[in-house]
């Protein structure tokens, strides 16, 4: 089975590619350049790397035909962000692949009615990223239902793992937040700290991709959330993170507009993007029932592993 992973050296690909190799797939990773995965693994020695400029090749109308020319049985697209990009690839691969998996996002939901959010809730996306990903998802499902295109959409939450900064208890990516908690220093949270964030370890996302391939009859034409078993409140997250360092969180709270005056514009924008999607709380009952998905990590376990990596490299000061 020849499987192509487009954008295969990123967060999820770091774990997915070795899983594919170990399962007996012949794997080709397509990327703009040969970048090392976040975590080394011997399986990468068996991987074929192909360099392509997706944006440039799509502009020339050749990206899809180049992928088709590699003669894949399965294509996993980790880096598709526009409807036009998805259409270009699907048109080239129609009738040529056994399975096509798209890495989407839980943010296709946007405004929600009830939690935990299920995959069948109507889409009301917020912001450019969610709107574009929802359009791709709708297009792919239409192709599955009306043209028999064998697609599945995987919808991750906040992906974490060793090698990058996880979404923190202020709902942004500033590693200094963990340093503040580690030292027992005061930390201000926006609003009342009750907004929800839903993490997932990158390896659990990889697990769900594998299960979708292994259970293709149940997965085709479907979307599945890839998240941990439970979401976190920002307040509870901060208290737990402080406890990792033997501290009690010294927390205070301010309305968002007042809170943002004390942080950088970059951090404020990132925080607002996550707060406006709250409650970020997604059901995994569907992938559990249909695919046997069992995440190995809770949200806190996944984040703690990532923070430990940051501490070991003195990115988080303790």
Image (cartoon, helix red, strand yellow):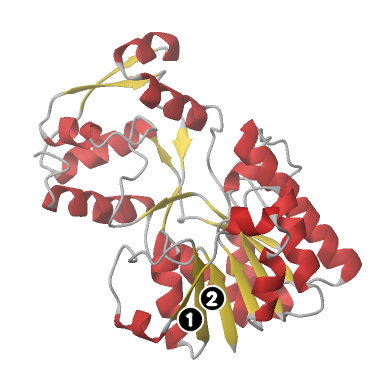
Q: Residue at x 47, y 67 (%)?
A: 8
Tell me: 204 left or right of 161.
Answer: right
Percent across and percent down for residue 118 are: 66, 50
Where 165 falls versus 192 (above or below)? below
Residue 248 falls in which quadrant of the image? top left
Residue 72 falls in which quadrant of the image? bottom right
- Numbered disc in front, either 1 or 2: 1
Q: Nearer the viewer, residue 58 or 148?
A: 58
Q: Secondary structure at mark 1?
A: helix
Q: Residue at x 44, y 85 (%)?
A: 21
Q: Nearer the viewer, residue 98 or 293?
A: 98
Residue that protrudes farthest toward the right in the picture: 146
Where 281 falls versus 48 (above or below)? above
Tell me: 227 left or right of 155.
Answer: left
Residue at mark 1: 20
Which numbered marker is on residue 135? none
Q: Residue at x 48, y 81 (%)?
A: 20
Percent across and percent down for residue 11 are: 41, 59
Where 25 falls versus 312 (above or below)? below
* Label 2 crowd (10 A; few <14 / some 14-19 / many >=20): some
Tell me: 176 left or right of 121.
Answer: left
Q: Quick check: can you spot residue 162?
A: yes
Residue that protrudes farthest toward the front in the picture: 60
Q: Residue at x 37, y 61 (%)?
A: 297
Residue at mark 2: 210
Q: Quadrant of the N terminus?
A: bottom right
Q: Quadrant of the C terminus?
A: top left
Q: Nearer the viewer, residue 93 or 222?
A: 93
Percent across and percent down for residue 188 are: 28, 19
Disc 1 and disc 2 in contact, CB within 8 angstroms: yes
Q: Quick check: can you spot residue 116?
A: no
Q: Secondary structure at mark 2?
A: helix
């Amino acid at each position: 089975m020849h499987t192509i992973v487009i954008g295969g050296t990123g967060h999820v690909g770091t774990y997915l590619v070795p899983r594919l190799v170990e399962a007996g797939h012949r794997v080709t990773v397509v990327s703009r350049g040969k970048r090392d995965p976040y975590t080394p693994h011997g399986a990468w020695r068996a991987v074929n790397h192909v360099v392509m400029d997706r944006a440039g090749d799509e502009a020339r109308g050749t990206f899809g035909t180049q992928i088709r020319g590699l003669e894949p049985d399965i294509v996993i697209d980790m880096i598709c962000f526009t409807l036009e990009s998805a259409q270009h690839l699907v048109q080239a691969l129609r009738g040529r692949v056994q399975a096509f998996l798209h890495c989407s996002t839980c943010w296709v939901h946007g405004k929600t009615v009830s939690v935990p959010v299920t995959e069948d809730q109507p889409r009301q996306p917020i912001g450019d990223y969610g709107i574009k990903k929802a359009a791709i998802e709708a297009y792919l499902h239409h192709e599955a239902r009306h043209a028999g295109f064998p697609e599945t959409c995987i919808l991750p939450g906040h992906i974490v793992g060793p090698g990058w900064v996880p979404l923190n208890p202020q709902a942004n990516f500033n590693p200094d937040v963990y340093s503040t908690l580690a030292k027992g220093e005061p930390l201000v949270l926006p609003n009342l700290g009750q907004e929800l964030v839903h993490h997932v370890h990158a390896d659990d996302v990889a697990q769900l991709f594998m299960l979708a391939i292994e259970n293709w009859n149940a997965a085709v034409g479907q979307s599945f959330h890839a998240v941990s078993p439970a979401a976190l409140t920002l307040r509870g997250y901060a208290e737990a993170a402080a406890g990792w360092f033997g501290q009690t969180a010294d927390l205070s709270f301010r309305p968002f507009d007042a809170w943002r005056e004390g942080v950088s514009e970059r951090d404020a924008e990132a925080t607002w993007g996550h707060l406006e999607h709250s409650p970020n709380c997604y059901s995994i009952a569907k992938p559990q029932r249909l695919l046997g998905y069992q995440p190995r990590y809770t949200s806190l376990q996944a984040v703690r592993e990532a923070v430990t990596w940051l501490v070991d490299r003195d990115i988080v000061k303790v």
